[in-house]
Amino acid sequence: MTFLRHLARSNRVSMLMQSTKQSTLPTTFSWCHQRWMSTKSDTTQMTVRDALNIAMEEEFIRDERVFLLGEEVGQYNGAYKVSKGLLDKFGQKRVIDTPITEAGFAGLAVGAALSGLRPICEFMTFNFSMQAIDQVINSAAKVHYMSGGTVQCPIVFRGPNGFAAGVAAQHSQDYASWYGAIPGLKVVSPWNSEDAKGLLKAAIRDPNPVVFLENELQYGITFPMSPEALSPDFVLPIDKAHTLREGKDITIVSYSRTLNFCIEAAEKLESEDGVSVEVINMRSIRPLDVDAIINSVKKTNRLVTVETGFPHFGFGAEVSALIMETEAFDYLDAPVERLTGADIPTPYAHNLEELSFPDTNLIVKAARRALYRKK
Amino acid sequence: MDAIPTYRVMDKEGKVLVPEEEPKVTEEFATKIYKDMVTLNTMDLILYEAQRQGRISFYMTNYGEEAFISCGAALDPSDVIFGQYRESGILLYRGFTLDEFMSQCYSNEKDHGKGRQMPVHYGSKKLNFQTISSPLATQIPHASGAAYALKRAGKKNCVMCFFGDGAASEGDFHAALNFAATMQCPVIFFCRNNGFAISTPADEQYKGDGIASRGIGYGIDTIRVDGNDVWAVYNVTKAARQLAVDEHRPVLIEALTYRVGHHSTSDDSSAYRSKKEAETWMRYDNPITRLRKWLHNKGWWNDETETKYRADIRKEILKSFSKAEKLHKPSLTELFNDVYDKPTPNLIAQRKELKEIIQKYPANYPLADFKNGGEDL
């Protein structure tokens, strides 16, 4: 972990900048949400941060074995305030501020899980989880298998993942493909508030170790919550993708933050080109809902993958390979378009950082390429 | 500054140095420990040879470190143990059967680990012994976490965690001690300082006063003990357990010993130390001999019982050994189980594919060696 408080503070400033930049987002979201809400009036608005907080609180109440540990999760309410109020409500037995040693508290969480507790291990960001990756991969992910199925390791490793804003190369990485490569781990990445709540609750209840990849820039964004999503029983399945927008001409698959841009791109393509775009929120990186992608490609015959990870051996690479290995390949009318983060250490300079990750325009451009449309 | 002193009960001849430190134990209790030490030693001889003959792939002996069996005697059976890999004796003491040891080393259908781990990676949920994990030192923070869970559950138990002088250089060791201290976890950290981390001698591993000096730095009650002295190890473990359970205080024990055997069957220690050095230790400071002499002095053991026990146990081990060798391999289905609590779609697809291939080319996939002949795939 590095310069934690400074980092948290500087990010809040940059988040304000970010939110003014994206003033078009709320209309986009309310539009797309109308598609799956029964009526507009029975929806509540909630930030992703609050959804995560409520998910933890509900699971704390539901199951005495659940507890949260990590750096500054208690007194300070978490570096990004995701655990706000939990220490006051549940006390030090359930919310533990740890010394600054990722390998230590991740290992401690594994030991506690082996002994029947259900730890939620917060990494201040997943960039810092590199300090503890052996505990995640060689201990948590393996112990059930290596013990001949006698011992389970129910644990959630959660925290912000992917690029933020102005935090440079060591704090701007997407670890979906890193953890997604490991048998024994489940890896999920929520996009909106319903995802955040339903998936986190599912992850906490899951008897397997789950890596839960949040996004710092999504924390402050408000999304509608359906009445069902407000229920303490609301849980989303970990292995199922969610079609955010149905379409027939091209499929865009993504997860987490970049879905904001995918939806914007879909709107733009529809209004400017008259193209019908399907947008799939993968929700889960491992297990990956391959059928959802295959079925969509069979319908639209064109595919764009969008992620903020590095291109080599990433999410898009995996999806492209899976398409080639299945019947979906025969349905493709154009090569798969793979949009990723730039293959460089992420720049600190704001203008260069912006150019390093897919945005709405880039997605539109790639989709047009796949549709053989020139503009 | 003076070095931290070493706690001892017996000298090398099994004579008690300070009478009041001699534990009040029964003949049955003391001979059980001794018999287990001999059993462990005999099993090591047989399985080491089995590896040399190519019958098992790997093995690690406990030569010179048999005294740690008494840790098992000082604990409650429901205390949780996290081993590194050279703690077979404690498992034996707790009641892991010879068949269970052999089945694990042979990866047969009775192996609790279903043939997924290298030999000596034992584990037993029933005996509260967590499965050995190959990566070095990861078990140390696990132990702190498990101890925290015990404390939270309000149990009158502790966790005991074993590791070597080399593992104590890993960051995990430092993290685990600091966490146990700050979170007041009932855990006993037991360092087997046997002088070598594979080939690296202790004097190249650290420059401070052994491992014990580090415990003090973390605010942890610490003691150094003669690791070849069964009763010294027993006493300190017992005292440590009391501190851990009654006061939720972690304890660090550094046991000084000497690794008489090679690190593992993948190692030839003659490349970095003289054979004579190891032989000298074996002859002049052998934990088994020390306890035997103590038992002789008590009149609880003699040459006759010695010869008889050694012959009997050898026979029993060999019987178990050949039985394990003849058992089937685990069921083929087990290849796909336990990656998750339930197989995920990709694993189900893999299992289906394997089944189809086997059905298509039965001659290339003889299944007679597997449990149920592969029928349950």
Image (cartoon, helix red, strand yellow):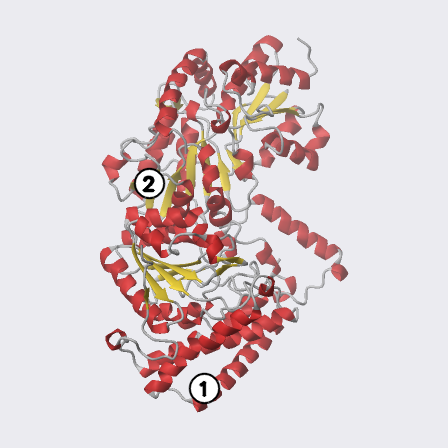
Establish if B347 lies above or below B91: above
Which numbered marker is on residue A357? Answer: none
Q: Residue furthest bottom?
A: B304
Q: Chain of mark 1?
A: B
Residue at numbered disc 2:
A98
Per the model, the C-alpha gap separating discs 1 and 2 is: 53 Å
Q: Position of residue B74 (x, y in %)?
A: 32, 69
Secondary structure of residue under mark 1: helix
Camera-nearest residue between B275 and A211:
B275
Mark 1 and mark 2 residues within 8 Å of each other at the beta carbon: no
* Residue at 41% in and 13% down: A17
Q: Chain of mark 2?
A: A
Where the N terminus of chain B falls, by quadrant? bottom left
Q: Nearer the viewer, mark 1 or mark 2?
A: 1
Camera-nearest residue between B43 and A374:
B43
Q: Position of residue A261 (x, y in %)?
A: 52, 18
Which numbered marker is on residue B306? Answer: 1
Q: Position of residue B308 (x, y in %)?
A: 48, 88
* Residue at 29% in and 42% down: A94
Q: Position of residue A178 (x, y in %)?
A: 55, 37
Query: In the image, B324: left or right of B21?
Result: right
Using the rendered image of the protein, determine whether residue A321 is visible from the camera's viewpoint.
Answer: yes
